[in-house]
């Protein structure tokens, strides 16, 4: 793929080298200390100021020629707890840890952007904040932590990318609104009263009640949620009982809850609680709903996502831009967008070289799309 900015081939080679080094040396969410050292030393060698935020995130800052407005660019840096499979020459050196989401690519791309910007400071109008963020994959999230530390205080808009296997190679796109889902978890305890399986009348059978609860939860999706708004409630784990003829005294249900708008997420939360407690009470049992609040929905700011679309069409061509459909996976970039305008962008790489889905043990990015991602970030800065 061609690039528009005069980008030395050495810069692109370095990006591939960085990416492969990071791929071979992955670190789990929240403990990316070696990765941070690597990023830090690269930024320092480029004379980029490093701002004071808690490790293992690194935040670089480049003062623009015009000052005033500040644009933030974000890369997530963590890997996943999985054994990598396949025969890549740069396969993970650590058992049980692997970059199978593409965050190694994101980090290398932002390092290349940092290098280009630092060597072409005369062309950098706005201030640029370079956020290399820890712990995207877990709760508590690295984005949430940085936002709470005030990273966005002087930021006017923030942009992030994900190399995306679900979008065809060569395409770049986003949605002008909700793009990724919230990721709440729910734990429901149904407390009845156990006894002999042959004498149900002397018990309050929580297993039977659980079947009602599981069924009724789907009525929230079909009867409470606006049919034009996506939402998911999935119970993935049911824990109860020990043997054939004992009615247990409690049942635990664990599930995930996803929504695409701030309002629908709250509505799902309230209704799950109300319905579960009501059903349990009506059967003489007690229902307790525990909610583990995850990332909020990722909602792009319309004005900023229009700006991204314009930049993509202007510098890559109309045929490259793709209006993407929202996905029900989560992404902690959502925390930034709760606080400041901005947009999250998918850089398509699906095809022969990136054939496995994200989080698959054989997942790999297609390095050939990295130049376009680097270019995109640079053009967003130049046109901001
Ligand atoms: Ni990811």
Image (spheres, rainbow, N blue to C red):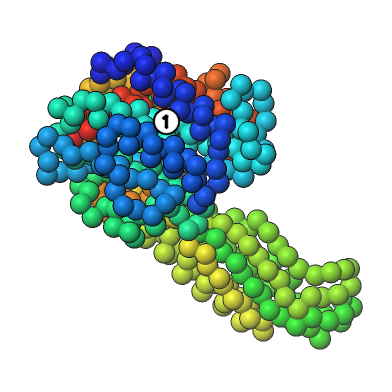
**Would you identify the image quadrant in which residue 358 lies?**
top right
Check the image and report above or below for 226 versus 80.
below
Q: Quadrant of the C terminus?
A: top left
Above or below, 282 against 317 in this view is below
Q: Nearer the viewer, residue 222 or 264?
A: 264
**Where is residue 9 drawn, in percent x and y?**
36, 14
Asked if one can make out residue 329 in the rendered structure from this viewpoint, the answer is no
Rendered location of residue 312, percent (x, y): 28, 26
* Residue 230 picture location, percent across and down: 45, 50
Residue at 22% x, 22% y is 314
In this view, the residue in front, 197 or 157, is 157
Where, by quadrant of the figure, is residue 289 drawn? bottom right
In screen coordinates, is 41 left or right of 190?
left
SS at mark 1 in the image: helix
- Along the viewing direction, whichever of 137 and 164 lies nearer the viewer: 137
Image coordinates of residue 249 in percent, x first then y, are 76, 78
The tally of labels here is 1
Which residue: 75% across, 83% down?
A: 193
For the residue pair 182 and 88, the one nearer the viewer reads as: 88
Instruction: Give the residue drawn at x 34%, y 60%.
Output: 148
Indicate left or right for 175 with 187 as reference: left
Give the crowd class for mark 1: few <14, some 14-19, many >=20 residues within 10 Å. many
Query: Residue tagged by mark 1?
Result: 108
Instruction: Evaluate whether residue 277 shows in this view.
Output: yes
Q: Does residue 106 appear left or right of residue 291 in this picture? A: left
Horizontal side, residue 184 vs residue 159: left or right: right
> Residue 235's quadrant in the figure?
bottom right
Q: Is mark 1 within 8 Å of ligand 1?
A: no
The residue that appears at 74% across and 70% down in the rendered structure is: 207
Vertical comparison of 162 with 292: above or below:
above
Position of the N terminus, as image quadrant, is top left
């Amino acid at each position: 793929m061609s690039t528009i900015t005069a980008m030395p081939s050495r810069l692109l080679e370095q990006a591939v080298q960085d990416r492969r080094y990071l791929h071979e040396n992955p670190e789990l969410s929240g403990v990316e200390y070696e990765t941070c050292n690597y990023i830090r030393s690269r930024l320092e060698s480029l004379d980029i100021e490093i701002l004071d935020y808690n490790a293992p995130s690194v935040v670089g800052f480049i003062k623009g020629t015009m000052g005033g407005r500040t644009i933030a660019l974000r890369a997530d840096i963590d890997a996943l707890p999985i054994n990598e499979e396949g025969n890549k020459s740069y396969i993970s050196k650590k058992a049980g840890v692997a970059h199978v989401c593409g965050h190694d690519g994101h980090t290398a791309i932002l390092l290349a952007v940092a290098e280009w910007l630092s060597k072409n400071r005369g062309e950098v109008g706005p201030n640029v904040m370079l956020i290399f963020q820890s712990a995207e994959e877990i709760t508590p999230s690295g984005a949430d932590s940085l936002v709470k530390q005030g990273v966005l205080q002087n930021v006017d808009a923030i942009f992030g990318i994900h190399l995306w296997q679900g979008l065809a190679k060569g395409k770049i796109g986003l949605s002008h609104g909700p793009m990724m889902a919230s990721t709440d978890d729910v734990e429901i305890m149904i407390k009845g009263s156990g006894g002999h399986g042959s004498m149900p009348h002397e018990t309050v059978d929580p297993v039977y009640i659980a079947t009602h609860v599981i069924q009724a939860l789907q009525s929230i999706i079909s009867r409470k949620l606006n049919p034009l708004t996506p939402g998911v409630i999935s119970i993935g784990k049911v824990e109860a009982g020990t043997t054939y003829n004992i009615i247990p005294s409690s049942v635990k249900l664990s599930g995930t809850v996803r929504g695409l708008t701030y309002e629908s997420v709250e509505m799902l939360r309230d209704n799950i609680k109300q319905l579960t407690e009501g059903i349990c009470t009506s059967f003489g049992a007690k229902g307790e709903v525990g909610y583990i609040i995850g990332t909020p929905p990722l909602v792009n700011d319309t004005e900023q996502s229009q700006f991204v679309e314009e930049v993509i069409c202007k510098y890559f061509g109309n045929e490259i831009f793709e209006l993407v459909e929202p996905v029900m996976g989560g992404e902690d970039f959502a925390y930034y967008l709760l606080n400041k305008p901005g947009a999250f962008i998918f850089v398509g790489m699906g095809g022969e070289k990136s054939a496995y889905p994200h989080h698959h043990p054989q997942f790999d990015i297609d390095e050939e799309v990295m130049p376009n991602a680097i270019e995109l970030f640079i053009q967003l800065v130049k046109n901001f």
